[in-house]
Image (cartoon, rainbow, N blue to C red):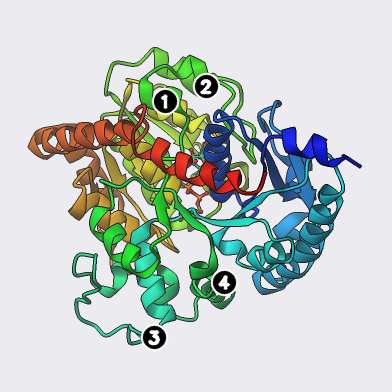
């Protein structure tokens, strides 16, 4: 056990505890890497299953583990989402407590826990150890504003069939709300976790958000009146990508899947600037087979080349013969290094499911989008992409819920060429510059980190 002198000399130790999903771990890891450059010690705390099965966690990054009660198979081995979330709360709390206990008698006790908003239970554990507690939100402020109003009972549910006004947001139609609110009862377990994450936010010492001020200024100002400790720290992507010096950030993240070497990037190198449609529906969602067919047919008939990420678990949904028939102009991969793909000059537009990370990545790298949202927060992100930031078009869904090949093709054509495409590209360039500005020396990110690190001074 370390003596008091050792402890006086040591650097602050921060534990970062994301919800165990790709879209949550990645942004919290990027944020951690930026913090670490300021001289603190950071450990990523993830589940045993994820630590064992993930690809490319930066080798230099310390990883500590907790249990979600499903150490052998993670969420896919749970009987239901509800059972998994209950188990994560119970086993996660117990094992995080044990971890903090062990560290408290080591040379490097924890001084702070930065926990994911989805892991609201971690705040209670942090309280027992009197460490600094900061919450990190991995979705947009806009969706948080909606969920907060739901949590407080300030929005009538089920949603009325009219435009709804919420402070900080543009008037929105019900289908533009997060699916868990619009389609009430669709995923009750996620709904409960998400809505109830706002119950103890006000007790956190700081509230970090993966967004940047200019992008969500109006809603941030509204939320700041509710939670004065809110601080935007995004976009959580490596600096090299914002500065155009990717080589500095080759070892950038954690991935649940293997990116098949650099096959996508090599393939893109042979394409003309702005000539490729990049298509990806994220790390998690299951795309209906009919939507895969509509997308496949659209890409086959479009005049543009395409790069399409189809996860191995989704590959059987591709129409028979599609890959061979389109081999001359298209490449289908099971996973890629998305940031590098988005930063490649061959990419002309991104057909996206509008997960918050993909949205922020495309906005920050100035890539025009065609929005094909599926579930959770994606409808709201799509609304902002098309109507607020005007960096893309939302493909309209047919009344059966599918985006048909014709509608998708029309959006791709408009974004890749044409007057609207020009306008969208101009807007995208403006947002790209603003994203970069957040990380200028002495800019808003530095200010937040200075304030955060000052909280440690009184502990030493
Ligand atoms: C989930 C939800 O679907 C989303 O709505 C929510 O905002 C976050 O959690 P996910 O499906 O993981 O998101 O999508 P997204 O948030 O966009 O994150 C996907 C991440 O995987 C991105 O960082 C993206 O760069 C990365 N990715 C994706 C790759 O690195 N390679 C790929 O081939 C595809």
**Pointers 3 and 2 in contact (C-beta within 8 Å):** no
**Pointers 4 and 2 in contact (C-beta within 8 Å):** no
Question: Where does label 2 land, which residue?
Answer: 249
User: Which mark is first along the chain, 2 or 3?
Assistant: 3
In which quadrant will I find the C terminus? Answer: top right
**Pointers 2 and 1 in contact (C-beta within 8 Å):** yes
Question: Where does label 4 land, which residue?
Answer: 193
At 82% across and 51% down in the image, what residue appears?
104
Q: Is residue 186 above or below residue 262?
A: below
Percent x, y for residue 11? 68, 35
Q: Residue 153, labelled with which disc?
A: 3
**Pointers 4 and 1 in contact (C-beta within 8 Å):** no
Q: Is residue 40 visible?
A: yes
**Pointers 3 and 1 in contact (C-beta within 8 Å):** no
Percent x, y for residue 263? 54, 20
Give the crowd class for mark 4: few <14, some 14-19, many >=20 residues within 10 Å. some
Separation (CA) of disc 4 from disc 3: 16 Å
Separation (CA) of disc 4 from disc 2: 34 Å
Q: Residue 241, labelled with which disc?
A: 1
- Foreground pick, 48 / 263: 48
User: Which mark is first along the chain, 2 or 4?
Assistant: 4
User: Which mark is first along the chain, 3 or 4?
Assistant: 3
Q: Residue 191, labelled with which disc?
A: none
Q: Is residue 285 above or below residue 81?
A: above
């Amino acid at each position: 056990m370390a003596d008091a002198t050792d402890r006086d000399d040591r650097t602050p130790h921060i534990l970062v505890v994301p919800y165990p999903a790709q879209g949550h771990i990645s942004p919290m890891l990027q944020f951690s890497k930026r913090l670490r450059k300021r001289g603190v010690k950071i450990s990523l705390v993830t589940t045993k299953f994820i630590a064992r099965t993930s690809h490319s966690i930066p080798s230099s990054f310390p990883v500590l583990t907790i249990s979600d009660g499903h150490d052998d198979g993670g969420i896919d081995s749970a009987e239901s989402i509800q059972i998994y979330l209950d188990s994560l709360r119970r086993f996660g709390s117990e094992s995080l407590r044990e971890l903090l206990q062990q560290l408290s008698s080591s040379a490097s006790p924890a001084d702070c826990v930065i926990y994911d908003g989805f892991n609201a239970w971690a705040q209670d554990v942090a309280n027992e150890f009197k460490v600094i507690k900061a919450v990190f939100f991995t979705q947009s402020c806009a969706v948080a504003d909606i969920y907060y109003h739901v949590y407080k009972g300030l929005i009538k549910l089920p949603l009325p069939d009219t435009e709804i006004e919420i402070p900080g947001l543009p008037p929105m139609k019900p289908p533009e709300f997060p699916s868990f609110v619009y389609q009430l009862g669709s995923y009750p377990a996620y709904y409960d976790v998400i809505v109830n994450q706002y119950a103890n936010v006000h007790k956190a010492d700081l509230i970090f958000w993966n967004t940047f001020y200019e992008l969500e200024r109006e809603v941030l100002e509204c939320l700041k009146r509710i939670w004065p400790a809110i601080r935007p720290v995004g976009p959580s992507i490596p600096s090299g990508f914002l500065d155009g010096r990717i080589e500095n950030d080759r070892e950038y993240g954690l991935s649940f899947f293997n990116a098949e070497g650099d096959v996508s990037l090599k393939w893109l190198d042979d394409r003309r600037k702005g000539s490729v449609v990049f298509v990806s529906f994220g790390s998690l969602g299951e795309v209906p087979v009919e939507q895969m067919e509509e997308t496949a047919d659209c890409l086959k008939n479009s005049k543009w080349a395409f790069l399409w990420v189809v996860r191995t678990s989704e590959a059987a949904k591709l129409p028979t013969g599609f890959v061979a028939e389109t081999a001359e102009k298209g490449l289908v991969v099971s996973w890629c290094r998305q940031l590098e793909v988005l930063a490649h000059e061959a990419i002309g537009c991104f057909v996206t499911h509008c997960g918050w990370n993909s949205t922020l990545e495309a906005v920050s790298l100035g890539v025009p989008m065609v929005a094909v949202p599926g579930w959770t927060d994606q409808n709201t992100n799509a609304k902002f992409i098309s109507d607020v930031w005007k960096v893309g078009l939302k493909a309209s869904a047919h009344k059966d819920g599918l985006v048909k090949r014709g509608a998708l093709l029309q959006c791709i054509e408009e974004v890749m060429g044409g007057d609207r495409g020009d306008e969208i590209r101009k807007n995208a360039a403006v947002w790209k510059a603003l994203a970069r500005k957040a990380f200028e020396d002495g800019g808003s990110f530095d200010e937040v980190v200075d304030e955060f690190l000052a909280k440690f001074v009184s502990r030493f």
